[in-house]
Image (cartoon, rainbow, N blue to C red):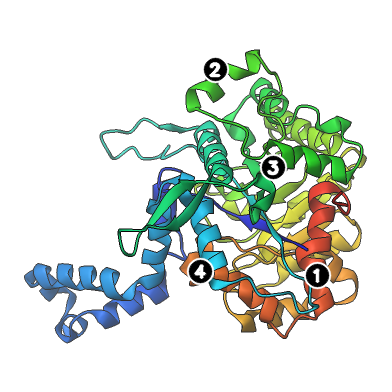
Amino acid sequence: MRFYDIHYHAFDLSHPNLLAFILREDLISKGSVKDFLRKLPCLMNLAPIGLFKMFPGKIAAGIRNFIEHDAARFRNLLTMMENQIEYHFLLTDYYLKKAGIPEMPDGNKIDKVVLCPLLMDFGYKNLKNSNVFYDLPPAKPVAGQVADLINAIRFYYTYDMVVHPVKEGQLMLVKSTGEKKDKLFLIFPFLGINTRNYDLLEIKALIDKYFAGYENDRDPAERNKKLEKKLGTVNATLEDLIFRLKEKEDPEYYSYIFAGIKLYPPLGFDPWPENEPAELDKVKFLYSECARKNIPLTIHCSDGGFKTSPDAVKFTDPARWKKILNNSSFRNLRINFAHMGNRADNSSEWLETIQALAASNKNVFTDFSCLTPEEKDYKDVAETLTGDAVNHVLFGSDFLINLLWSGSYTGYLGNFIRTGFLTPEQKTIICHSNPERFLFGGPVKIS
């Protein structure tokens, strides 16, 4: 069977807004500071703050020692992010196969894992960084991430990662001797778009560039087949993506790379900016194109993550989508509200809003990405699966961001398969049936 991970990230250190990354509340938190202070020498824990100035060497050594020996999850995350993006899928594949993928509890063997890497449109960063010399807002065009991701996908289907025959403890790339169909992963990314970073004509150009022909797909299997066929065949450069050189020869060269679109309100995207006519026109166009072309949307829906907008919480509130989903023009939108509306204060308000939207719309889904780093965490998920709710829940890992809480992708996947809090039937619905309805509009029959 196919196992779908609907919420996945393939980053390297050049992709995110690093200031937003460093200032993530889950990276530098009250708990992590307490852990750090406990690891400092006893004198540092007892001394008044003023005395810290007398021991800068000991403090520096304490920080280095903490990062080197105790902040294992942080180092684990950075280890993956420091690798070339081209190696990302090859490394994940290598370690997953090395550990062995457990069978589903109903006896089904997982022969394909479908990954949906979600790009994030960080746009213009550090707009308020006015107290430094280099205070111009550098553009971080999504095109750069697109080029990197496309090439990582091409690498995955062109090469294999194997143990180095001479250098102990190292891996090396070798030309793949098998066919594309023999690879474990199918990779169906989502394009990150923040309408505030573009004018209307630029948004139209993005849709034309990456989603040409989608409106002509007759059924889920056809959409799946076209996405699979494109895997590993595109060679991209930032120059080509910006100046559209290859498209002059083949207008659909970049079409069918992406399965959907990712929206990220904490970076300033407002789902329904009714007091901004120009911005409202852009989001209306985006939604109408997604409905017309059968393009699914994943929306960040927790109060954590990369936050650069002062209105992050207001924009993220799923209640902002009521007007959109009640609009007949957008009724057919397929939407995944990620993270089950998780709130740091454990409030269930956002989750209840998502459940209410799903109860009245078969095309509304939610995923539990980053919420289940341990098997016991599925107890909370299970308690939400009452009535028809199970038909609206998707498996998502939030890898590689979930390395802040989890040891590995292999472990996160295994927790879901092994947990006793979900029935075998529920697991199949969540990791297979529901994702196919979300991604394609229905089940995919593989010929």
Decide: few, some or many residues near mark 4? Use Cα within 10 Å; few <14, some 14-19, many ≥20: many
- The quadrant holding residue 48 is bottom left
Q: Which residue is mark 4?
A: 408
Which quadrant is home to the N terminus?
bottom right
Residue annotated with mark 1: 428
**Where is residue 205 drawn, in percent x and y?**
67, 22
Q: Nearer the viewer, residue 294 or 266?
A: 294
- Eye-nearest disc, 2 or 4: 4
With respect to residue 103, does 177 lie above or below? above
Which kind of residue does numbered mark 1 sit on? Thr
The residue singled out by tag 2 in the image is: 243
Under mark 3, the amino acid is Ile
Q: CA distance from mark 4 to mark 3?
A: 26 Å
Residue at x-position 87% and y-position 45%: 220
Label 2 neighbourhood size at 10 Å, few (<14), some (14-19), many (20+)?
Answer: few
Give the residue type that dot 2 points to.
Phe
Residue 357, percent across and down? 84, 59
Q: Alpha carbon of mark 1 to alpha carbon of mark 3: how far? A: 25 Å
Q: Is residue 334 above or below residue 5?
A: above
Q: Callout 3: helix, strand or loop?
A: strand
Q: Are marks 2 and 1 in contact (CB under 8 Å)?
A: no
Q: Is residue 15 above or below residue 57?
A: above
Query: What kind of residue is marked 4?
Result: Ser
Q: Position of residue 240 (x, y in %)?
A: 53, 22
Q: CA distance from mark 2 to mark 1?
A: 44 Å
Q: Dot 1: what SS?
A: helix
Residue 323 visible in rendering: no
- Asked which quadrant contains residue 409, the reply is bottom right
Q: CA distance from mark 1 to mark 4?
A: 22 Å
Q: In the depicted view, which residue is nearer to us: 286 or 273?
A: 286
Residue at the top extreme? 248
